[in-house]
Image (tube, rainbow, N blue to C red):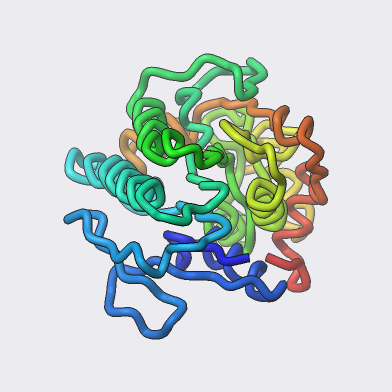
């Protein structure tokens, strides 16, 4: 297959690209600099510039572009960047695909579990659940809506709504692992809040499933089927590396360090992957113990 990926140098994009190339697929990377080879296509979502010619005849396109939600403290300017880096990039990608003479069959465009809000306590959240009204929820709604040009062009559009992706090379797990090794990790803001986690391996497998399986369209929660409290996940991690997990982090401390983003870190989202499982996907790492083991193993594939 020929597959174009935006955000291919990020945590998930790197793993997806590696997996596809290892299996012999041709991957085109959308980059924001001068292309370094025939497998790269320059684009600039800020000014709306992209050369569509190399994208003709694609089998699939994957959109993972967007500034990191937890990379910086949320100032007003950074919140604008978070939204615009997603909506502008998605709009440009979708419009370009829709205008091709030979468009791809499927457009897999990222979203996130934040679409359900910051805190839904112990409510089970599947793809038919109501969405939230806060900043992240509205951003995710606009992010998904930006794919409309591709959908209107009869391209199958899938929205993988990512949970907390756990892998050694980045994301939340890398930070948690560092704190756990130092013995300074414990329950966050009481610890009862649900974390909807998933291994990086299953994340890549789920994206490939959406790319490769005809008939997939719409929203898919990309989480493990057994979400647990943050206290339980941290306990499993600490036990796996033989460290204590007894130093709690109160909410006011998170607020000082993280600002507005603290309410999302301390929120509870019990997200389940109903549509993914019903479509035939089977997780290799369905629970916290297997997710942690996969993240800690040097032999785990991307």
Q: Quadrant of the N terminus?
A: bottom right
The x and y percentages for residue 278 are 78, 30
Residue depicted at 43% across the width and 60% down the height = 7
The x and y percentages for residue 28 are 48, 70
Please give left or right for residue 76 compared with residue 275 in the image.
Answer: left
Q: Between residues 77 and 48, which one lies in front from this camera angle?
A: 48
* Vertical comparison of 94 with 121: above or below: below
* Vertical comparison of 154 with 205: above or below: above
Q: Does any portion of residue 252 appear in the rendered image?
A: no
The x and y percentages for residue 162 are 56, 41
Furthest toward the front, the residue is 101
* Vertical comparison of 67 with 35: above or below: above
Please give left or right for residue 208 compared with residue 152 in the image.
Answer: right
Q: Quadrant of the C terminus?
A: bottom right
Residue depicted at 22% across the width and 41% down the height = 80
Residue depicted at 41% across the width and 75% down the height = 40
Q: Does any portion of residue 50 appear in the rendered image?
A: yes
Q: Between residues 98 and 23, which one lies in front from this camera angle?
A: 98
The x and y percentages for residue 282 are 82, 43
Q: Between residues 163 and 152, which one lies in front from this camera angle?
A: 152
Residue depicted at 46% across the width and 35% down the height = 151
Please give left or right for residue 110 compared with residue 287 in the image.
Answer: left
Number of numbered discs overlaid on the protein picture: 0
């Amino acid at each position: 297959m020929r597959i174009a990926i935006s955000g291919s140098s990020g945590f998930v994009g790197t793993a997806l690209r590696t997996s596809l190339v290892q299996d012999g697929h041709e991957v085109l990377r959308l980059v924001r600099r001068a292309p370094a080879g025939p497998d790269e296509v320059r684009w600039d979502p800020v000014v709306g510039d992209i050369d569509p010619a190399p994208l003709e005849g694609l089998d699939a396109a994957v959109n993972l572009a967007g500034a990191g939600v937890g990379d910086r403290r949320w100032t007003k300017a950074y919140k604008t960047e978070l939204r615009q880096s997603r909506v502008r990039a998605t709009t440009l990608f979708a419009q370009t695909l829709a205008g091709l003479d030979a468009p791809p069959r499927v457009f897999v465009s990222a979203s996130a579990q934040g679409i359900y809000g910051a805190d839904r306590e112990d409510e089970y959240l599947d793809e038919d659940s109501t969405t939230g009204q806060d900043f992240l929820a509205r951003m995710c709604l606009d992010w998904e809506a930006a794919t409309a040009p591709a959908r209107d062009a009869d391209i199958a559009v899938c929205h993988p709504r990512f949970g907390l992706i756990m892998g050694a090379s980045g994301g939340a797990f890398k930070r948690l692992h560092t704190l756990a090794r130092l013995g300074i990790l414990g329950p966050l803001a009481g610890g009862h809040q649900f974390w909807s986690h998933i291994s990086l391996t299953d994340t890549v497998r789920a994206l490939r499933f959406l790319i490769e399986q005809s008939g997939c369209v719409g929203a898919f929660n990309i989480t493990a089927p057994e979400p647990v409290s943050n206290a339980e996940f941290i306990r499993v991690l600490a036990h796996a590396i033989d460290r204590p997990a007894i130093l709690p982090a109160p909410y006011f401390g998170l607020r000082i360090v993280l600002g507005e983003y603290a309410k999302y870190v301390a929120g509870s989202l019990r997200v389940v992957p109903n549509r993914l499982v019903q479509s035939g996907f089977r997780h290799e790492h369905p629970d916290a113990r297997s997710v942690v083991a996969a993240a800690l193993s040097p032999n785990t594939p991307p």
